[in-house]
Image (spheres, helix red, strand yellow):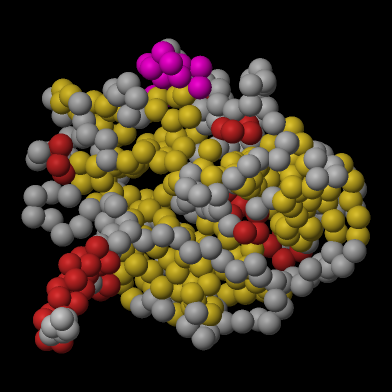
Amino acid sequence: MPQNHNPIMKNNLYSLLLLLMLPSVLISQAEEVNPPDFIKTITFKSNTTQGQLPVLKLGERLFLEFDALNANEEDFYYVIEHYNFDWTPSVLAKAEYLKGLDNQRILTYENSFNTYQVYSHYTLQIPNIQTRALLKSGNYMISIYDEYDELMFSRKFMVYEDLVNVGARVKRSRDVSVINEKQSVDLVIATNSINFNNPLETIKTLIIQNNNLNTSISDLKPQYTLGNELIYRYDTESAFWGGNEFFWFENKDVRTSNVGVQFIDLKDIYQSYLYTNIARNGRPYTYNPDLNGNFQVTAADRINTDIEADYTMVHFSLLQDELIDKDIYVYGNFNAYAIEPLTKMEYNTESRKYEVSFRLKQGFYNYKYVVVDSETNEIDEGAVSGNYWQTENDYKVLVYYRDLGARYDRLIGYGEASSVNISN
C-alpha cells in the first residue's frame, strides 16, 4: 500500500523538533577559541597577575597583548561580553555592564625591531577612551576579530568585588586510596556585608589549579554554616590530582644554549633544541621550582622585550614507547592549556621518541606532556608526569552570588592558596 505523506504534519513535527532543540542551543556554554598559527604570545596583565587567566578587581586596569607574525600590520577589533557563572550568556544588556563602546579597533601596536621573525605587537588597555569602564562583576569573554569580521581568538577573564573573605587551605586527600596522589582544598567564606539568603542555591564556587580551567572544580555547596561563615571540607569533591612540577626551559639568549636547551641552530630563524625529557610517572618525586605552568617573556641585552625579543622554533622530544589509540601533546599556559594540532607530537620510530616543534617567543616557559584518548578526547595529565601530593601548586578560589530575583551572577570574592603549606 502507498504510504500517506502529509507535508503539513511533517513540517509541524520539524518545527516542534527545532523548538525542542532551541533552548539547548541558547544556553550552550561559551568556549575559548584558539588563535591561528600566526597569532602568538597572548598575554594578560593586570596589577596582580600576568599570564592567561586574569582575575581582577572591579575598576582595576587590564592589559591584553599579543603578536601577529604575518607582518601585515592588520587591524584587529575587540568585543567584550558578560556571562553567568556557568559561562552561559548573561541577560544583561551591554549598556548595563559596559560604559562606553566595544567593537573598536585596537589602536596601539609596534613592529618588531632587529629580529629574524618579523611581527607586530598589539596592546589593548581597558579602560580606554572608547571602553571607559566595566560596570559589573562576574565572568567576561573578550573576542578579537580581524578587519573582515573573522574571529581570531577569544579569552576568558573574571572581575570581582571584594565583599567576602575567602580562606583556602590545601590538605592531603582524605581518600586513603589516593592520599599520595591528590590534594584537597578546604574553604571558609565569611562576610559582614552580605546576608546570605539560602546559600545552598545562591552561592557558587569555582576552584582553579594553576590557572587551568580544564581541571577546575565548580559549584561546591557549603556543608556547614557557622554564624556568618560558610564551611567547605569535602573528602573527595574538592580534590585535585597533584600532578608534578612542570618541565621548563629558558632561551633568553638565542645565540647560546641555556637552561633546558641542548643546542641551537640558525636557519630562517633560530632553532632551540631542548633536552629529551623522560616519563616521570612512577619515579620518586623531586622538587623543582617552576612557575606552575606559566611563562615569562625575557631576552638578554634587550630593552623592550615586547618588540625586541625574537621567536625561535622550539623542538620538544619525549622518550616514550608508542601509545595505541592515544596522542601526546605539549601542554602549558603558553597557549591557555589548549589541546590543538600545533602542539600534537608525532612518534619517530627511529629515535623511539615523540617529537614536535613550534614557534615561541624568547623567555622562560613551563610545560608538561599530557595524553589524550583519541576516541573520547579525555585528557590524562598524569600519564607522563605522574601525580604526587608533594607537588607545589597554586589555587584560585572564586565565589559567585546571585540573590533571589537577581538577573546575573556577581563575583563577590577571590582567594588564593598554595600547596607549599600543605598539611594532613
In the rendered image, the vertical position of residue 5 relative to residue 279, given as above or below: below
Residue 360 position in % (x across, y down): 71, 57
Residue 75: quadrant of the picture: bottom right
Q: Is residue 384 left or right of residue 92?
A: right
Give the position of the N terminus as an image quadrant.
bottom left
- Out of 289 and 13, give the one closest to the viewer: 13
Residue furthest to the front in view is: 1
Residue positioned 53% across, 63% down in the render = 34
Residue 195: quadrant of the picture: top left
Residue positioned 32% across, 21% down in the render = 235
Residue 217 position in % (x across, y down): 36, 38
| 217 magenta-colored | no
Q: Is residue 36 left or right of residue 132?
A: right
| 175 magenta-colored | yes
Residue positioned 74% across, 40% down in the render = 318
Task: State which region is magenta.
Answer: 169-181
Residue 19 position in % (x across, y down): 17, 72
Q: Is residue 74 left or right of residue 356?
A: left
